[in-house]
Amino acid sequence: MAGVFQSAKRQLRVFPIALALMAAFWGTANAEEPFDPGKVTGPEIQAYRDAYVPREYPAPARLWFYADVAVVAGLLLSGTWLVRTNRPVRWISAQLAMALLYLGLIRGGCICPVGATANVLLGLARPELIGLATLALFLVPLIAALFSGRIFCGTVCPLGAVQQLLSKKRPRAVPVSLHRILLALPVVVLLATAATVWMGFGFLPCKLDPYTPLFFQGHAGVQKLAAWMAAGYAEPHWIVAGSAPAWGMLAAALIAGWFIPRIFCRYVCPYGVLLGMLAVVGFWRREIDAEACVQCELCVTNCPVQAIQPSQDGKTLKLSSYQCVQCGSCSRICKRQSILRKMPVESTAACTPTAKSKRSIFPSRT
């Protein structure tokens, strides 16, 4: 009897295995053949296949690239005209507002040579990683700096636009000794940017940019509006771009920039180092006419980047082309019209209170 029970147990153990094998065989035998569009036949379908001609559509990114380069080049040309003809500062502010709208809000602030600096530095080590758009947006403002100084900073850059439009009319000067020390920080940031990208630690300028949440928020709003207009549907909830620390960093930068104009441009931006170096050796710059200047120092107190400083002896004023962002404030405020342009540059400008008056080549405008 015990042998019978053991034999029954063995059969019960084999039964589930046999059942599973039968189910698998049955499923394989009755499985439907997968759908293959290529095997669908019919006169209409065959006629469509015979008449079909593949089309090549341009990539949207390339179309945006052409638009971005055209906008940046157009703003640089317009800014050069505004600066060289000494147009009112409100005209330059209007152009900065347009640059902020397109480059900052519509395009999300990513069309920016500041971030492109890290891309180009990475391309020095790995050229295959740098794109044509990045290289073009990096080089065009540098070429413009040779002929018009830091025109990009004063009339095109969306970061500069935020800082200039949201600052006091009468800037608060940083102590000269501290200002000279802080001018070394952008050089350090530029070197650190090269080190971080080559070591694979990311893009340092993008991490230091405090205005990213503002640009991303504007870009998200524009995309939501475009989606609603195109398809009649958009995300019903309010979109918040960026984290709480990022918005806190933005608030701190806006508060600091209200009292100290262009604080990011002066003491952080690595791209400004390259623009300033080319402006120094370029073909056009602002200078102070020594014979017309009476050393009232109105230009000193109104320069947002403290590019005009008294000399050590206190008898002359010097204008630094490296720091000047071509905002036009000094030319507007100078009642003697002593802010000149020189092409080419021969020496550092200076002015003395005892020199004779000389007519400026800038027309008088208000």
Image (cartoon, helix red, strand yellow):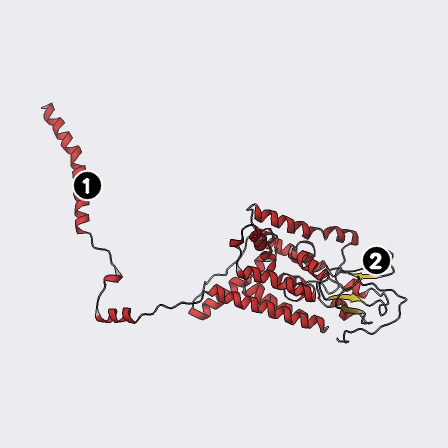
Task: Specify few, some or many for label 2: CA neighbours under 10 Å numbering under 14, 14-19, or 20 or more.
Answer: few
* Residue at screen point 87% across, 60% down: 315
Q: In the structure shown, which secondary structural element does the residue marked by tag 1 occupy?
A: helix
Q: Position of residue 70 (x, y in %)?
A: 56, 69
Q: Amino acid at mark 2?
A: Ser
Question: On the image, numbered disc 2 is attached to which residue?
Answer: 311
- Is residue 34 visible in the rendered image? The answer is yes
- Image location (x, y in percent) of residue 59: 45, 65
**Picture layout, residue 117 above or below residue 91:** above
Quadrant placement of the N terminus: top left
x and y percentages locating residue 8 in the rendered image: 12, 30
Residue found at x 88% / y 65% = 353
Asked if the residues shown at circle 2 and circle 1 are in contact, with their CB atoms under 8 angstroms apart, the answer is no
**Residue on which disc 1 sits:** 20
User: Taking 277 as reference, is 15 above or below it?
Assistant: above
Q: Nearer the viewer, residue 3 or 309?
A: 309
Say whether disc 2 or disc 1 marks the residue closer to the N-terminus: 1
* On-image quarter of the C terminus: bottom right
From the viewer's perspective, is 213 left or right of 233? right
Percent across and percent down for residue 197 are 57, 49
Q: Please identify, in this view, whether the residue under mark 2 or under mark 1 is nearer the observer.
A: 2
Residue pictured at 89% horizontal, 68% vertical: 355
Residue 152 occupies quadrant: bottom right
* Labels in figure, total: 2
Q: Is residue 264 left or right of residue 14?
A: right
Depth check, front residue: 97 or 144: 144
In the rendered image, the residue lying farthest to the top is 2
Secondary structure type for disc 2: loop
The residue sitting at the right extreme is 354
Residue 331 numbered tag: none
Taking 211 as reference, is 30 left or right?
Answer: left
Q: Is residue 97 above or below residue 181?
A: below
